[in-house]
Amino acid sequence: MDDIEAIKRVQGQYGRAADTKNWDLLRPTVTADFHCDTGAGGKGETTGIEAFIARVGTNPAVTVHHALLPEIELTSPTTATGIWAVHLFAKIPDGSAVDAYGHYHNTYEKHGGTWQLSSLRLEWLHREIRPGQPVRGGAA
C-alpha cells in the first residue's frame, strides 16, 4: 500500500474508533503526543492520547464522523499533511441532534513503517442544533 492510501486508511480507522468508542482501535492511529483542537464549536484542545480519550470517552452522544475529499501532501518520507472535508452528526441523550460541517487540518507521522495522526485541527463552517425526543433504551 502506498503512503497516501495508508494515510487514508488510518484516518478512516481513527473516525470509526472514535465513533464506536473503541479506544484499543484508536490508540494505534495516533501518536502518543497527539494534539487535537476542535475549537470553540467542539470540545477545545487536548494533547496526549490518554488526555484525548479521557475527554471524548465521557461524551454520551452517539456520533458519526465523515472525513471526505482528502488533500494529502507528503512533506518528507515520514511526515505528511492532510485537509479533509468533514461532516459530523451527533445524537445527544436529550434527543437533540447536531449536524456540523467543516475541515480537518491534520498532520501525520510515519513511525516504524506505520502512519499515525500527530495533530488534528477542526475548522467549523456551519453547525445546526435541532431539538428532538430523548433517546430511550440505547442509540437512536
Image (spheres, rainbow, N blue to C red):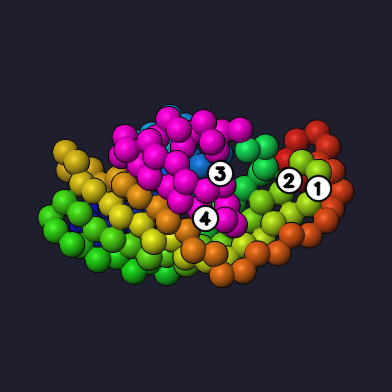
Q: What residue is at 42 percent from the left and 56 percent from the top?
A: 121
Residue 19 badge:
3
**Whether residue 68 can be seen here:** no
Circle 1 sits on which residue?
A: 95
- Three-letter code, disc 3: Asp
- Three-letter code, disc 4: Gly
CA–CA distance in space, label 4 to label 2: 19 Å
Q: What residue is at 83 percent from the left and 37 percent from the top?
A: 136
Q: Earlier in the sequence, mark 1 or mark 4?
A: 4
Circle 4 sits on which residue?
A: 39
Q: Is residue 106 above or below residue 21?
A: below
Circle 2 sits on which residue?
A: 92
Give the number of the mark in front: 4 or 2.
Answer: 4
**Whether residue 44 can be seen here:** yes
- Three-letter code, disc 2: Ile
Residue range corresponding to the magenta coloring: 30-58
Residue 42 badge:
none
Give the number of the mark in front: 1 or 3.
Answer: 1
Mark 1, residues whose alpha carbon is within 10 Å: few (<14), some, or many (≥20)?
some
Q: Secondary structure at mark 3?
A: helix
